[in-house]
Amino acid sequence: MFRNIFNPDSPLMITMAQITDCIFLSLLWILCCFPLITVGASSAALYDSVFRAFRQGEKNSWGRFFKVFKENFKSGILPGLIFLLLFYLLVKLVVSVWNAATVGAASFAVFAAVALVAVLVLGLLSLIFPVLSRFENSLSGLVKNTVFLAMANLPRTLLLGILYALSILLCLRFVFPLFFLPALASLISTVLIEPMFRPFMPSED
C-alpha cells in the first residue's frame, strides 16, 4: 500500500510535485524580476515553463525556466521596461480617477469606464511575454503581433485582464499568494492564450 502511495507516478506524488513546481516557479519568477530589466525574460520563462510542465507534462520545469530565461534575456529587456512603464501609467490613471470619484470631481460611471479600459489594456500587456516565449520577433513585430492577437480575441483579452487584475489585488492585499499565485495565474492564462496561438503554430501530422 505505502509502496503505491510513494510511487513517483501515483496521483499523490504527482499532485505533490505539481504543488512544489507551482511554488518554486512562482518564487523563481519573483527573484528573477528583482533587477526590473529582467521582468520580460522572467515572465516569458514563467509562462513557458508552466505550460510545458502542467499542460504537457514535461519534467524539470526549473531547468526549462532558466533555459527560456537565458534565451529571452536580451530580447526581453525592452518589452519588460515598456510593460513596467505602461503598467505604472495605467495604475496611476485608475487611482487618479478613483480619487476624483470619491470626492465628487468625477462620477463612478466614469471610473467604471476607465477601469474597464484599464483591465482590457492589462490583458493586452499580459500577452506580450507569452508571445515572446513562443515566437521570434523584433520589438516592432512583438508589439504588432501582440496587439493583433489581443484585438482579434477581445473576450479572451478581457478575461486575461480580469485574471491578472485580481491576482495583483490579492498579492497586494495578502502576502501568502505570492508563493503560488504567479505560476497559478500563468497556468490559468494558458487556457485563454493557447487557443490564440493555435492557428499560428505548425500543424502536426
Image (tube, rainbow, N blue to C red):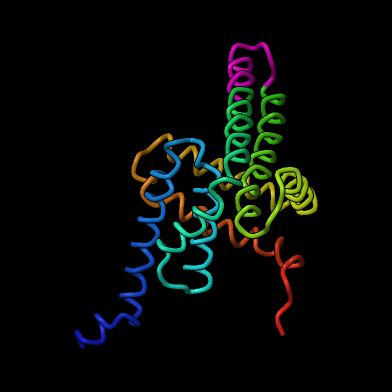
Q: Tell me, yes or no, whether the highlighted magenta stretch contains residue 177.
A: no
Residue at coordinates 37% horizontally, 38% vertically from top-left?
174
Residue 139, how many percent across, how many down?
70, 44
Residue 198 percent location from the top left of the image:
71, 67
In which quadrant will I find the C terminus? Answer: bottom right
Q: Is residue 116 shown left or right of residue 6?
A: right
* Location of residue 193 with respect to 53 vertically, above or below: above
With respect to residue 182, does 168 lie above or below?
above
**What secondary structure do most residues of the magenta stretch adopt?**
helix
- Residue at 69% across / 16% down in the picture? 106
The residue located at (74%, 77%) in the rendering is: 203
Question: As drawn, is 29 to the left or to the right of 117?
Answer: left
Query: Seen from this angle, which residue lies furthest left?
Result: 2
Q: Quadrant of the N terminus?
A: bottom left
> Relative to 21, is 43 above or below?
above
Residue located at (34% from left, 44% from top):
176
Using the image as rendered, state which of residue 162 and residue 202 is in the foreground. Answer: 202
User: Left or right: 194 with respect to 8?
Assistant: right
Q: How many marks?
A: 0
The magenta stretch is 94-107
Q: Nearest the camera: 106 or 117? A: 117
Looking at the image, residue 5 sits to the left or right of residue 38; the answer is left
Question: Residue 7: where, in percent of width, then height?
Answer: 28, 83
Query: Residue 182, position in %: x, y?
Result: 46, 49
Between 68 and 54, the residue placed more toward the observer is 68
